[in-house]
Image (cartoon, rainbow, N blue to C red):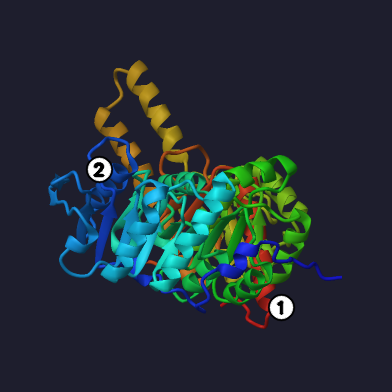
Amino acid sequence: MKAKLEDNTAEAKQRFESPVPELDPIMYPQSVAVIGASSAFGKWGQLILTNIVAGGFEGKIFPVNPKETSLCGLPVYKRISDIPGPVDVAFITIPAGGVPAILEECGRKGIKGVVLITSGFSETGSEGAALEREITEICKRWNIVLIGPNTMGIISPYAKLFATGTHTRPRPGGVAFVSQSGNLGNQLVHWASQQGIGISQFIGSGNEAMLGCADYLEYLEQDENARIIMLYMENVGDGRRLLSVARRVNQKKPVIVLKGGRTSAGKAAAASHTGSMGGEFLIFRAACRQAGILNVDAPAELLDLSAGFSSLPIPKGDRVGIVTLGGGWGVVTADACNENGLRVPDIPEQIVERLNKYLPPFWSKRNPLDLVGTRDTEVPIVAVEELLKWDGIDAVISLGIIGRTELVRLLVNSTRRVDPTASAEVLDEIEGFVEKYEETYVATMVDLMEHYQKPVIGVSLTRTDRGTVRAVDGKRYSGVFYQTPETAVNVLARMVDYSRFLNRQGNPSS
């Protein structure tokens, strides 16, 4: 029997009814107003304004505060009506009681979108819920698109618009984040930035008074910058519509969900956090499978998948080639592949014969390809390409090639301390050679992926400060290097799940 996900919230029926909400004025504005802008360090009006200005937004910025004359080197306007010229989006940070009147002023000014940072609405109880309904009706009457309330803000790197309380500024990329929790969403974006993951949009959806996840999915479906969509959800809202939209969107770009409120404790926390109540998780998960939505259980997994999906080609099947500098990692990775439904086929004799030219007689001669700690810098590249050439392999996991720089640096530092005869120039050259080799290896892996259209997922030999994703200028794909084999295998297995969904829909990955 197919799982049913019911719409169990009355508020869902009041959501924005346009097929695709007009979010471009919010995500790609030419002009912004910050209502409640402030000089008081740490207040929301100061956090949002300074982030927008310091982030390099190139459009017009209008701070609004009746008690200020200048903020961040910009003139301050006492009222919205005093602003010269049009305003695309207003960020509102004033207390909840004053929001209805301010929204009326926004409507008269012709402002197209509002990001309502202010809290004190449905998450606080019945009085707050009534106020939330009131502001939603005002926005509908004035044709204002409303994000929030109770949101941490938005980020749009392609527009150089950084408007969140946390001053994280990720590079432009293909991952769109929509989060009902602004706090968790901001933390994920910060982590993503540290890992080198590029962001197309971050939207803290907050209480979702007007727009729900299905609305954001429909908008992101047609946004070319968003190539993969990540959702953190506590409230499902209109379940039938969400699944219908997600099934369609999934055929163009993957949708990955972290669901909060999976347990009784989580449900109670969600209710007090964003005013939402989660549905039964098992039903939700089964319904997501039917729509091709990939579920994750932890924020870290959301980041892991965002790195893989945004940086690698989608595998066409489940057959994995493994290249490793040492036998133990190959064994562990092969076990993890089998445990996650991936196959590790034996390699044909012609690949063995070609690699015999590069490796000693005692190499493994099977998949995983154990390179027995070779120091020949060409061998790992040759081994990966031999697997990619073969039509019996859909993806390659490469272990231990990246990360040797850290170990070489430790060796060089020890040598400097204890060997006074060691040439400093030679030691510098050794470090430089290894660093240059890693850069060359990453670029070569990206070239191979673009040529063969098969993913190559790396596992770093050591923990590094270089991040998971290593972008290569001018290339569609990027190098991806996880810290553990099990992470690499899990990401690949989820990518295979998505590939199978596309095949079932008659839309195989290209």
Where 37 sits versus 502, above or below?
A: above
Q: Residue at x 31, y 41 (%)?
A: 432
Q: Is residue 14 left or right of residue 151?
A: right
The C terminus lies in which quarter of the figure?
bottom right
Q: Residue at x 72, y 59 (%)?
A: 344
> Please, what is the three-letter code of the amino acid marked with disc 1?
Arg
Locate residue 494, reporting x and y percent.
65, 60
The quarter holding residue 273 reads top right
Q: Nearer the viewer, residue 360 or 452?
A: 452
Callout 2: SS: loop
Callout 1: SS: helix
Q: Is residue 79 left or right of residue 98?
A: left
Q: Nearer the viewer, residue 130 or 5?
A: 130
Q: Which mark is residue 504?
A: 1
Using a 10 Å C-alpha cutoff, classify the residue at mark 1 as few (fewer than 14 neighbours), some (14 to 19) or many (20 or more): few
Q: Nearer the viewer, residue 55 or 390?
A: 55
Q: Which residue is mark 2?
A: 38
Q: Is residue 29 visible?
A: yes
Locate residue 147, reporting x and y percent.
44, 60
> Please, what is the three-letter code of the amino acid marked with disc 2?
Ser
Locate residue 250, reporting x and y percent.
60, 72
The quarter holding residue 10 reads bottom right
Q: Residue at x 55, y 64 (%)?
A: 212
Using a 10 Å C-alpha cutoff, classify the residue at mark 2 as few (fewer than 14 neighbours), some (14 to 19) or many (20 or more): many
The N terminus lies in which quarter of the figure?
bottom right
Q: Is residue 147 left or right of residue 232?
A: left
Numbered disc in front, either 1 or 2: 2
Where 18 sits versus 199, above or below?
A: below
Measure the C-alpha gap from mark 1 to mark 2: 54 Å
Question: Mark 1 vs mark 2: which is more N-terminal?
Answer: 2
